[in-house]
Image (cartoon, helix red, strand yellow):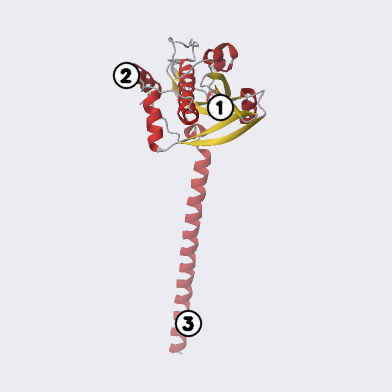
Amino acid sequence: MYGRRLIQRLAGIVAVWKAGIRLFVTLAACSVLTGSLSSQVLAQEQPEEEHQERIWDHELNRWLTPEELGHLEIYFSEDEAAQVMFPDSEKIRRETLTLTSDQKAFVEKVIGWEFPEYTFDVFIGETQGNVDGYALIQNTIGKHRPITYMVGVTATGECMNFEVMVYREARGNEIATKRFNYQYQGKTIGDPIRINRDIINITGATMSVRSASAGVKRVLVLVNEFYLKPRGLGRDVLAANKQEKGFFEVLFGL
């Protein structure tokens, strides 16, 4: 009799113990799930503004609005821009110009500023086996955003055209107009290609103009060094002087 009661009591203790374990596991699982859901809810409730990029405009003396930050004007695709550069060429072929570290360092020394790219997309217009010219796609920072444009160079090393492909700034899109970019036509590596020297500025778009001018200079040097010189048509260039280096250091924060 006593043994039977002892067994029943032990069985009850075991049952309670198992129930306690189940309760503990259930509470623990709920806690984890609740914590996970809470984290998701908090993440969802956080205002999107905290994750958005914020840029202060010193001229406007305020933060740029989301509309200004997301501004985008597309003028040409790559192929369309190439057609504008070589309207009369029989064919336009595309290749990639890749620089070694030494070649990149040389170009940087000549133009007076450093750049991150090692490769450039090049379009070459040809007619009856003769080269009509070269056109390179450039991406250089404007005031806040990069500007994508194409610079065309003749077979003898003169800038023949400049076309903005994508403009991402809220102001300053006048650089995409012919009344501005005609200034680059005829420029060579021997020209300053600088604001207040041989390029007229656009009010409110100074950084975009400087950026575009720097890109034109780079294209002229790249074409001269890697396409014209191998054909015996290039010219020797000197490194940028201190004044020019100072200009590009201000422009690119170097």
Residue at 54% over, 28% down: 136
Q: Position of residue 241 (x, y in %)?
A: 34, 19
For label 1, the residue is: 134
Residue most extreme to the front: 232
Check disc 2: other Cα within 10 Å, few if <14, some if 14-19, many if 20+: few
Comparing marks 2 and 1, which lies closer to the viewer? Answer: 1
79 and 36: which is toward the camera:
79
Q: Position of residue 218 (x, y in %)?
A: 46, 25
Residue at 63% over, 24% down: 86
Disc 1 and disc 3 in contact, CB within 8 angstroms: no
Q: Is residue 50 left or right of residue 247?
A: right
Check disc 3: other Cα within 10 Å, few if <14, some if 14-19, many if 20+: few
Q: Quadrant of residue 105?
A: top left
Tag count in the figure? 3
The disc labelled 1 sits on which kind of residue? Tyr
Q: Secondary structure at mark 3?
A: helix
For label 2, the residue is: 242
Spatial separation of the CA atoms under disc 2 and disc 3:
98 Å
Q: Secondary structure at mark 2?
A: helix
Which mark sits nearer the N-terminus, 2 or 3?
3
Figure quadrant of the C terminus: top left
Tell me, for residue 39, which label it has, or none.
Answer: none
Residue most extreme to the left: 242
The disc labelled 3 sits on which kind of residue? Gln
For label 3, the residue is: 8
Residue at 42% over, 17% down: 58
Comparing marks 2 and 3, which lies closer to the viewer? Answer: 2
Height in image: 13 above or below 131?
A: below
The disc labelled 2 sits on which kind of residue? Lys
